Image: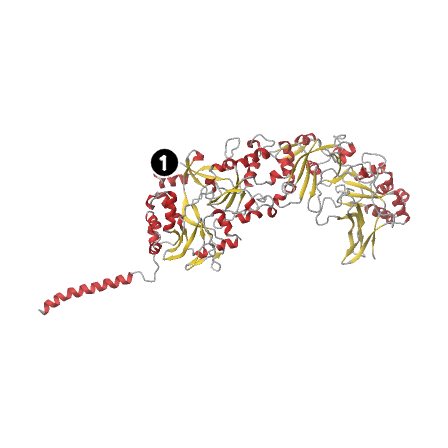
Amino acid sequence: MVNKIKIYFFPLLCLLLFSACNKSKDEYYAEPSWLDKPLYEVLQNEGNFKSYLACIDRTLYAPQLKEGGYFTLMAPNDEAFSAYLNEKGYTSVDDIPIEEVNKIIAYSIIQSYWLSENLGDIFTGTVDDRYDIGDGLKKQTYYYATVYKDSEYDNRWVIDQNSTSTSFNTTTNNFKYYPVFMQTYFAKANLTAIDYNTFFPNTQYIGGQTVETGMIGNVYNGQIVKPNLKARNGIAHEVSVVGVPLDNMDKFLREDQYNTFKSLLDFKDVSGSYVYKNYIEDATQTEKYKLLRPNDAIDKVYVKSYNTSGLQPLSFSPALELIYDDNRSNLTQSNGYTLFVPSNDALTNYINNRLLKYYHSLSDLPIEAITTLINTHMVNSMIWPSQLKTSQVSTGEYINGQGALGNSYDNFGVTDKKFASNGFIYTIDHVIKSKLFETIYSGIYLNPSYTNLDAVYRVYYNLSLRQDLMKSIITGYPNVRYTLLMISNDQFANDGFTYNSETATFSNSSLVSTTVSERIRRLTRTHLFDGWVDNNINSEVNFTDGISEYGGYGFRNTDYGDVVRYKNNQLQASGNIEENTFVNITKNETFDNGTVYTIDKMLQYSKRESSPTTSDGWNSGTLWHYIQQTAQENSNVSMFADYVQYALKTTSTDALLGISEDNFYTIVMPNNNAIIRAQAAKDLPSLDSLKLGTLSQERVDMCVKFVQTHFLQGYAFPDDRLPYMYPYNINSPNKNIVSTMYRITNEPMKLFNQHTNIVVSKDASGSLTFTPDDVYIDGKLIIKGNYGLPVPVPRIITGTAKTGNNGYRSNRICGRSIHHEYTNYFKFTVQN
C-alpha cells in the first residue's frame, strides 16, 4: 500500500514541479510591469483611436507599430476620422480605398522620436547642443511620392525630381513632410496667430499652450490635443485632424486660375523644346517601378524637373520637395518657397501692355524677359503675411513695390492662398514690379530698336552702371532718378559700330586714334544724367532750366563727366558746339527712377561730322586747342593763355607740363586785369620775360605754379545756377573739394608732392564759388590758401564773348574741360 502511494505520488509531484518550473519560466520571460507598451497598444488603451488603428491594421505598418521601430505618430483621434469620413462621403474606415489608407498612415508616421516640446526645433546631432531651437516647421514622414501619369506629357509615367538636377537621386525618395506650427518656431520668426489663421481661418491657433502631458500646438489645419503618449517604440501625439500628404506647387498650378502663369513655366522655344521644364527618361526608375507595380504596364519612367541652373534658371522648382536657400543650403525642415501668381487677366494685360509694347509675341521677346517675369514672383523662403511688407522677391524687388512705405498683406491684393507641401502660393490681382520692366532700363531692354545699347551696358557695365539704372523704389532706392537719352541701333551704326552677339564684342572699322571701348563707353555715358529726389531737393534733369546770362542755355554734367548745354529741347556737347549741330530730344516715357528720351542723333564730344577720317573727328580737342580757342574768342583771358603757352606747353606738341589729357578739368582763368595785378604784387613774373626766356628757373617755376594752381582736376564745374552741387551728393550737397594741379614739395617742411585744394561751393542762389583751402597736418597749418587780391570780389564773369559758337566768357564747354573767366587768382603759401 505504501508502495502504491509512492508510485502515485511521484507523477503528481513531477507534475507539480513541472508546473512550478513553467510558471517560473513565464515569469522570467514576461514583460516587466514598468516597460512601456508599444505604440499600437498605447493608442488602443487610450480608447479614442479605433478608426486610426483600424487603418493601421490594413497596412504593412501594423507589425512595426505593434512591436519594433522608433517612431513619432501624429495620431488622428476618432473625432478627426469622423470629420474626414463625412468630408469624403465614406460611411466607415473600411470604405477608404487602400491606397488612400496607406497614404494616411505613412504620412502620420514621422521619422525619429520627437517630444512635442521639440517639434518646433531641428535635431542637430551634436552632443552639447542637440537642437536648433525654433527652426523646425516640418518633419519628414514615411510617405513619399512615386510615379504618376502626367496629363501634360501624353499621360506617360513621370516621377517628380528629388534633387536640383534633372536626374533622380537613387539614395533617397521624394519624402513628404508633416507641417507643425509650434510657438518656438513662431516666436523665432516673429510670427503671430494671424499668420497661421490666414491659411487656416477655421482652426484656433494654440501655440505656446500646455496640457498635463506637455506642450501643444497646431498641425496643418488642426491641433495637437494630447501630446507625448510615450511607448517602447516611440511616441504619439493625439491630433484633431487626419493628415493627408500635401500637393506641391506644381500640382496646384494645374488649376484654371493659374493658367496664364503656368503657360510661362511651360514656355517653349522656337524649336518646340521646353525652356524651363524637363522630362528625362530614367532607366533605373523604370526598372524599379516595373517590379514594384507589375500590373500598371509601366514601360518608361521620366523624371520631371525645372531648371534652377544654367542660362535661364528659375529661382526654384515648383516640383521639388527639398528647400534650398540662395546659398544652396538645405532648409527643407525649416522653410519653404513662396510663389505669387497674378490672376490670368492681370498677367495677360501686363504682358500685352508692357512686355509686348514693341514686340508681337512672347516668342519675339528675349528669353531673359520671361525668366525675369517668373522669378520676380518667386521667393526662396516662406513669406508669411506679416513679413510681406518688408520682404523681397528672388530678383531683389520689394514684393509690394515700396518696402516699409508700401502696402501690408491686407491691402496687397491677395485673392487666394494655398499651403503647398513645398511652400505658399498667393494669388494676387496684379503683377509684381520688376526692375527690368519698371525702371528706365526697360526703355532700352523692351524695345528692339535699342538692342545695341542694351549690349553696351551688358558688355561694359553689366555689374555696375547697368545695375544702377535698375535701382528705384522697388529695390529700396526711392531717391534715385536718371535721365537717359537712348542711342538707337541705327545711330550706333551711323557712327560705324557693329555688334557680334555670338562673341559679345563691338567693332568699328572707322575709328581713328582711339579704341572701341574708349569711345563707346564715353558716348554711352554722355547720354546719361544722374538725379536725386527727396523732400528737400529734386535734381532730376528735365532740360527746362535755362540761364538768361548764357542765352537761355542750361548746363549739366553727364554721367561720364562731359558738360552739355540745352535749350528748347536741343542739346549740344563739345563736338556739337564746335560744329554748330544740335541734338533734338523727345520725351518717351517716365519710370519709377527717371525719364527716357529719344534723340535724332548722338551727342558728340568731337568733330565727328566735319572730320570723319581724322583724329579730330574721334577725339576731344586737346586742352591747349581749347585754351587757345577761348583766348581768341574772349580776349579778356588772353594773358592767362599766353602764360599757359610759355610756361607749360611743349614747343612741338600741344602737351602741357604735368597735366594729363585724360582727366576732366575746371580751368579758372584769371582775366587780364587780375594777371596785371598779380604781376604788380610780385606773384607772377612778367609775360615778356617769360616769352624771351630770360627768367631764372625759380621765376619760371613761379609761372608754372601760378598756371597749375588754376587747373582744378577731376571735374568740370559749370555755372549751372543750381542751389546744390550737381550731381547731387546727399552727404555734401553744397560743397566739393578738388585738387589743383599744383603740388608742393618742401623737404624742410617734410612735404612731398603735397596737394593744394580748392573748395567749390554753392549758396542758396546757386552762385558758383571757388575758395582756396588751407592744409593742416596734425592740427598745424602748413599751407595757407588765399586769394591773390583783396578786391574785387572773386567771381566768375558771365556775359557774351566776342565770337564763336561757345559764345560766353564763362561756361565755355571745351572737350574735357570747362573755362571760366575769373576776377581774382588763387595763391598758396607754405607756412614756415
Whether residue 171 appears in this view of the structure is: no
Report whether 697 appears left or right of 586.
Answer: right
x%, y% of residue 437? 60, 38
x%, y% of residue 125? 46, 56
x%, y% of residue 555? 76, 39
Identify residue for label 1: 297
Q: Residue extending furthest left?
A: 1
The foreground one among 685 and 731 is 731
The foreground one among 421 and 298 is 421
Look at 32% across and 62% down and name the residue there: 33
Q: Residue extending furthest bottom?
A: 2
Whether residue 629 appears in this view of the structure is: yes
User: Measured along the vertical axis of the image, is residue 394 above or below residue 27?
Assistant: above
Report whether 434 appears left or right of 642.
Answer: left
- Type of the residue with mark 1: Ala
Q: Quadrant of the N terminus?
A: bottom left
Report whether 137 appears left or right of 59.
Answer: right
x%, y% of residue 117? 45, 57
User: Measured along the vertical axis of the image, is residue 612 above or below residue 75?
Assistant: above
